[in-house]
Amino acid sequence: MNPSSDADARNAAGPDHEQVRPATKQRRRDLPDDANLREAWQRNATDWLAWARAPMHDSYWRFHRDQFLTLLPEPGALTVDVGAGEGRLTRELVRRGHRVVAVDASPTLALAARDADAATTIVVADAAALPLRQNVADLAVAFMSLQDIDDLHGAVRQVARVLEPGGRLCAAIVHPLNSSGQFEDRPDGRFIIDGAYLRPRRYSDDLRRDGMAMRFVSAHRPLEMYVDALGDAGLLIERLREPAMPDEALRSIRDRRWQRLPLFLHIRAIRG
Ligand SMILES: C[S@@+](CC[C@H](N)C(=O)[O-])C[C@H]1O[C@@H](n2cnc3c(N)ncnc32)[C@H](O)[C@@H]1O
């Protein structure tokens, strides 16, 4: 999930309690360029499991899942969920009539996904080496995973390989603007980019809230890198959305900052 936005999204007690001090603590650190994202997600898998499954704890439950689902085509023959984690979106897709194969690099999260839905095929694999036949799927979803995957180009190439011609990839990522900086720590704070938007880098955000802690380890990549990865793999962008936080999801005056700048970026691309 989105580190800085979720920190803000989870901060306040509610619109009627805007003076309440933020309950979420956040600390961001730059990491070495060779920091291994895949290993970091496995290390933090138990924390993620608790975080992702706590009802209404993060943006997925509050608004993000529903915004993303509007991008998806109708269920077809096979949907591949890339970076499926503990499987909350997989289960939602199944409920909506998709036949899903879910893939995640974390054995702990894949096991949890299987425990929650024994009927769905869950595979432990790197997104950059999908153990699936070519042209096997008409839809791939990558919900909040591409920014956490070490080999972005490799993963997108693999998605294109398993998609049939005319098949689609629907992806949600931390918006590159979001990951390039942070808001000042006040309700109407300015957004500050201390470093360089154009410089890819790896970073971690430590979040703590409601007795839960989570370290998000991700890559900041400028938008151009995502567009290049899609284009190089033969995927043509059909839609690009920068959804604002909806009014009904606001919990504090601080959240309104995410109506000025996008938290997330949604892309739908078609295999030519
Ligand atoms: C922010 S979580 C999103 C999980 C899920 N899509 C959700 O929204 O609940 C990112 C996921 O990407 C997975 N991941 C990281 N690197 C990966 C890789 N190289 N291949 C496959 N999955 C990977 C992590 O294990 C983690 O489950």
Image (spheres, rainbow, N blue to C red):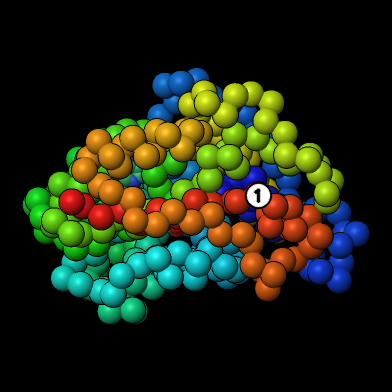
What amino acid is at disc 1? Leu
Residue 91 picture quarter: bottom left
Please indicate whether residue 239 sits to the left or right of residue 32 in the image: left
Mark 1 Cβ inside 8 Å of ligand 1? no
Question: Can see residue 66?
Answer: yes
Residue 59 picture quarter: bottom right
Q: Position of residue 136 (x, y in %)?
A: 11, 58
Q: Nearer the viewer, residue 82 or 107?
A: 82
Q: Position of residue 265 (x, y in %)?
A: 49, 51
Q: Position of residue 197 (x, y in %)?
A: 57, 29
Name the residue at 42% across, 21% down. Answer: 34
Residue that extends furthest to the right in the rendered view of this protein = 19
Please indicate whether residue 68 sits to the left or right of residue 235 in the image: right
Q: Position of residue 120 (x, y in %)?
A: 24, 69
Name the residue at 84% across, 46% down. Answer: 186
Residue highlighted by disc 1: 261
Q: Is disc 1 surrounded by few (<14), some (14 to 19) or many (20+) residues within 10 Å?
A: some
Name the residue at 64% across, 62% down. Answer: 245
Rendered position, 89 above or below 1: below
